[in-house]
Image: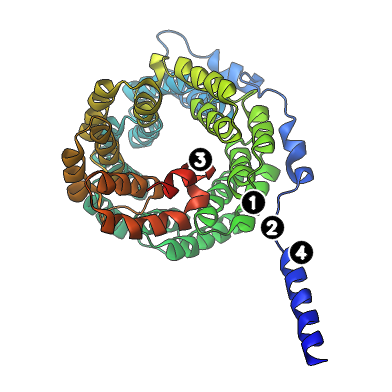
């Protein structure tokens, strides 16, 4: 009788586990996949844009138009709007005698979006020199120094901002802890920031918070929490491509449902033309064995990034593309060296090490890995390169612990990369 009861209890427990297994539901997000093309001209925009002449000194018009161009870029990913915002801000900065620091910070943010980090730093220093908005400038300097890999300087500016009641401080402290590999602390700080955003009822802060905390929950393996926050973002902004992409990744990496992930991504890329989205579509087609469709999406990416307006924005993707699809190793090396010169971070050194590995220079790749990467990042994709470098140099004992860590990060890396881990 006791054995029977125990067996019945086990059945109940297993049933409970099965019913609580998380799965996405199409009805949760289907409505967000049918969206009209975003408007890129409004009456408000036209009113202010018409005030600007070729030799215009209409400072207010320039600022407002730049803001609208940024908005159009965020909705469409069309880089022409980012460049138009840059031109308007540069002109505003050139003619203004008031609030110069504010325009310098806005232009720095634009340069960051374009991966022109050294120019962003110049604008941040200009804002610092002319004064006004000291805390905003310190926050900007933290952001720029993090991008440039100047982590000691970044920490100095973060310390100067310390205020647990400040949304700006909390999100930057979260970023710092993510860089240090303290994911639990990162999430705690982001949850505090989210609470601030919710109490403020500021739609922009909420949207940013929901998508960022969704990312962090995904890194922590809290897939349902990640999913729910992407949905919250979409309730605020039904056109938000980033949140939809986040859901597509959950469907692909967690549920292994490539067809549904592609349905979501196809809906996004109807009106949102970010080149990296086509790389993700190519990856999913590879997983599904659709090599012809993979090639179509790779071609789409390749032709898009030929646009000179992208500048350095896709350099990291382009290096991988040259290594994995074009076998243009010398071109990749030149671009990787350029990236390291522009910002010597673990991410750029990883690209350089990866390139040397492809060139058959295993010892050079190992030297870079040991000196510039090991112990300086916890990013799974970089750890994967490190493991490959160790393997190529016959250091199998150092591969195994990394392999274990990579298996734990299989959701972040995705099903295609997960297969690579097995061969390490």
Nearest-to-viewer mark from 1 and 2: 2
Question: Where residue 378 appears, x then y in whole percent?
Answer: 35, 54
Q: Residue furthest top?
A: 54
Q: Of callouts 4 and 3, which one flags the residue occurring earlier in the amino acid sequence?
A: 4
Residue position for label 2: 22
Q: Are marks 1 and 2 in contact (CB under 8 Å)?
A: yes
Q: Is residue 281 above or below residue 199?
A: above
Judged from the image, the secondary structure of the residue bearing numbered disc 4 is: helix
In which image quadrant can residue 308 be found? top left
Nearest-to-viewer mark from 4 and 1: 4
Residue position for label 3: 416
Q: Nearer the viewer, residue 196 or 347?
A: 347
Residue position for label 4: 19
Question: Where residue 301 appears, x then y in whole percent?
Answer: 49, 21
Q: Of callouts 4 and 1, which one flags the residue occurring earlier in the amino acid sequence?
A: 4
Q: Nearer the viewer, residue 26 or 115?
A: 26
Q: CA distance from mark 4 to mark 2?
A: 8 Å
Q: Is residue 174 above or below residue 16?
A: above
In which image quadrant can residue 166 be found? bottom left
């Amino acid at each position: 009788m006791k054995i029977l009861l125990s067996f019945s209890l086990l059945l109940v427990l297993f049933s409970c586990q099965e019913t609580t297994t998380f799965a996405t539901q199409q009805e949760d997000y289907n409505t967000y996949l049918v969206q009209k093309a975003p408007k890129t001209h409004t009456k408000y925009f036209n009113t202010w844009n018409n005030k600007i002449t070729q030799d215009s000194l209409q400072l207010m018009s320039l600022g407002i138009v730049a803001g609208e161009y940024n908005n159009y870029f965020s909705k469409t990913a069309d880089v022409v709007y980012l460049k138009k915002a840059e031109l308007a801000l540069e002109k505003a900065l050139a003619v203004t005698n008031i609030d110069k620091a504010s325009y310098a910070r806005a232009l720095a943010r634009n340069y960051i979006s374009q991966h022109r980090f050294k120019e962003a730093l110049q604008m941040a220093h200009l804002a610092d020199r002319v004064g006004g908005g000291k805390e905003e400038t310190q926050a900007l300097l933290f952001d720029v120094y993090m991008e440039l890999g100047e982590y000691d300087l970044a920490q100095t500016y973060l310390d100067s901002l310390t205020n647990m009641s400040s949304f700006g401080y909390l999100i930057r402290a979260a970023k710092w802890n993510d860089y240090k590999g303290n994911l639990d602390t990162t999430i705690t700080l982001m949850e505090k920031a989210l609470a601030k955003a919710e109490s403020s009822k500021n739609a922009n802060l909420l949207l940013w918070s929901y998508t960022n905390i969704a990312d962090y929950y995904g890194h922590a393996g809290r897939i349902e929490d990640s999913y729910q926050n992407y949905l919250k973002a979409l309730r605020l902004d039904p056109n938000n491509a980033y949140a939809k992409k986040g859901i597509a990744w959950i469907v692909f990496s967690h549920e292994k449902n490539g067809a549904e992930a592609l349905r979501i991504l196809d809906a996004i890329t109807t009106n949102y033309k970010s080149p990296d989205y086509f790389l993700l579509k190519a990856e999913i087609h590879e997983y599904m064995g659709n090599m012809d469709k993979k090639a179509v999406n790779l071609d789409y990416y390749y032709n898009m990034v030929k646009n000179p307006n992208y500048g350095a924005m896709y350099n990291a993707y382009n290096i991988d593309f040259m290594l994995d699809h074009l076998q243009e190793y010398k071109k990749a090396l030149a671009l990787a060296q350029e990236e390291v010169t522009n910002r010597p971070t673990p991410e750029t050194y990883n690209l350089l090490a990866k390139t040397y590995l492809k060139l058959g220079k295993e010892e050079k790749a190992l030297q870079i890995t040991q000196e510039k990467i090991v112990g300086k990042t916890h990013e799974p994709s970089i750890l994967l390169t490190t493991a490959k470098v160790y393997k190529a140099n016959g250091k199998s004992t150092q591969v195994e612990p990394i392999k274990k860590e990579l298996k734990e990060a299989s959701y972040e890396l995705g099903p295609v990369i997960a297969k690579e881990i097995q061969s390490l």
